[in-house]
Image (cartoon, helix red, strand yellow):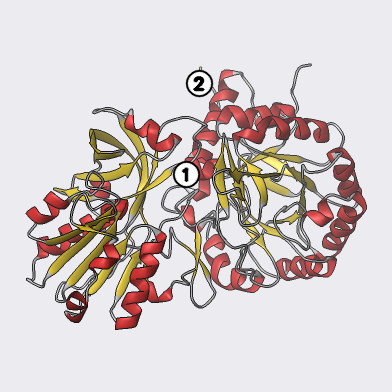
Amino acid sequence: MKKTRPDLSVRIGLLRLQNPVLTASGTFGYGQEYAGLVDLNRLGGIIVKGLSLQPRPGNMPPRTVETPCGLLNAIGLQNVGVENFIADKLPFLRNLSIPVIVNILGQDIKEYRKLAERLSSVEGIAALEVNISCPNVKAGGVVFGTDYKAAARVTRAVRAAAELPIIVKLSPNVTDIVNIARAVEEAGADAVSLINTLTGMAIDVETRRPKLHNVTGGLSGPAIKPVALRMVWQVAGAVKIPVIGCGGIMTAADALEFLIAGACAVQVGTANFVNPRATMEIISGIEEYLVRHNFKDVKSLVGSLIL
Amino acid sequence: MVRGARSKMDQVTATVLENRFVASSVYRLRIEAPAIARVVRPGQFLMLRVGQTLDPLLRRPFSIHAVHDSRTVDILYRVVGKGTNLLTAIKKGGKLDIVGPLGRGFSWREDLPSLFVAGGMGIAPLFFLAQIITQNGTGAKTSVLIGARNKIELLCVKELKAMGLQVEAATEDGSAGKRGLVTDLLTRKIITSRPVLYTCGPYPMLRAVAHLAREHGLSCQVSLESFMACGLGACLGCVAEMRNGDLVRVCKEGPVFDAYEVAWK
């Protein structure tokens, strides 16, 4: 008897994904950078590089340094700004058949609101990911992500301004991530994604200087996966909205861990740098696993952790 | 002018034909990668995964050193850390996961005299450009100034001479060529022949060559080095500052730049 293929589709509120594999913001450019290497239309969706109202030059180099099983970065949210994105980057993305999620970052609540309004007014955007967790910029970002009241305020503002599903990306650099997750849920978020990078630093002992110009940066990659998985498991158990898991996912097995822990979908980030085809291999690997374990769909696997 | 265009990149599995010790801590890796060899241009680079390890995690960028018969590609590398150390262990017949060719290479003029200024490992990408210019052979004079710490680290001199190039060397300890820096070889006589400069090497050397080119109004292209996470223009990690204040990606807008455009520190 021939088995039917498992259903990989998932729902994030009103947003339907053909499979649970998204690209993490800041690791996949505006999609086009990977067009020659990845069948973009096979992805669950693309989350583009964080956008601000105005173009941002980013931090001075050096901006990245490799650490054991990890990548420390302090890019400083270099981006083309929302208007250039709409004019130059969105037309390419719009031609894809998959959802395009735009990550947004403001220096204050007004900027978040303006970004949400502007991006809601154009065709071709499926959802917004509200970045309240970038550790590498002085104003905005993580300032909102480390205080539950501020996180709720940003969420409410974006909720009121956006006609799109909103995902709030949480920072792991907090005492209690569950507290923040609950606050943004209550404020109207359709989903949360976690984790953003863990703040870290590296020093060149020969010169006694920091390896990053910004001194500190955000750590990503396999080094942070156990921390991310623990946080996803905690948050998934505490909120009713969908949780998108992220942090050090390199393989299908890594992605499956997050799904089993309770994530409805995953974001693949640093792995795109190491293996541009990582997302494709992860999608195939999830499907093979579902077949092997007789799951008819990926939804049945989500939160199936046996304790 | 032959424009340093970008070529279509791909992710390929290449077979190692040779991974040979050259001198000091320098190795030459020869791989069979026709898809890359056919389209790669001088100054472009590859992102090479040295193994399936999580530490080292990222790919390593290597410039193309030479191409043979549109089938094989040479990479000249120095062992500097974990990644390159692991690379030395890969034997003939081994497989390597490669993304490339990447970046924008040199734009060259075959009708004008060319002058290559290489410091240490900087000869790696310049060698490929010299290979292409001499193959096409319009007869315009092509010379090489090459510098290293000592005689052992002075690379490719024999091969460059065999290509019919005029080579002048400088070493810091005086064990070969003139004692001193490669920039000491940039004499008035050379400059008055108004060559186009192509340079690659340590940052202070590049800066000195760029300043000299500017002073004498010579066209100068410089291949910059930077730590890269992706090599694809996505991570925005490898930026260099330009004179107009822009921070541009070395992997995408470079690695070869017009020396006048770079904000030298």
Would residue A10 appear left or right of A116 to someone viewing this image? Answer: left
Provide the residue designation for mark 2.
A2
Given the image, what chain letter belongs to the residue carrying mark 1?
Answer: A
Would residue B206 appear left or right of A127 to someone viewing this image? Answer: left
Residue A277 position within the rendered picture, expressed as x and y whole percent measured from the top left: 47, 41
Depth-wise, is mark 2 or mark 1 nearer the camera?
1
Provide the residue designation for mark 1.
A276
Q: Nearer the viewer, residue A124 or A38?
A: A38
Q: Label 1 sits on what residue type?
A: Pro
Residue A286: tell me if it is visible.
no
Would residue B103 appear left or right of A77 to someone viewing this image? Answer: left
Whether the residues at callouts 2 and 1 have beta carbons within 8 Å, the answer is: no
Task: Determine the residue positioned at 16% across, 52% down.
Answer: B157
Task: Determine the residue positioned at 72% across, 32% down.
Answer: A227
Label 2 residue SS: loop
Task: Determine the residue positioned at 6% across, 71% down.
Answer: B139
In this view, A296 is above or below B227: above
User: Label 2: how many residues lie within 10 Å, few (<14), some (14-19) or many (20+)?
Assistant: few
Quadrant in which the C terminus of chain A is drawn: top right
Q: How many marks?
A: 2
User: Label 1: how many residues lie within 10 Å, few (<14), some (14-19) or many (20+)?
Assistant: many
In this view, B35 is above or below A30: above
Q: Nearer the viewer, residue A18 or A3?
A: A18
Lower sequence index among marks 2 and 1 = 2
Q: Nearer the viewer, residue A59 or A37?
A: A59
Would residue B212 appear left or right of B28 to someone viewing this image? Answer: right
Task: Name which quarter of the figure residue A60 lies in.
Answer: bottom right
Residue B160 position within the rendered picture, expressed as x and y whole percent measured from the top left: 14, 55
Task: Name which quarter of the figure residue A90 lies in.
Answer: bottom right
Given the image, what chain letter belongs to the residue carrying mark 2?
Answer: A
Q: Label 2 sits on what residue type?
A: Lys
Label 1 residue SS: loop
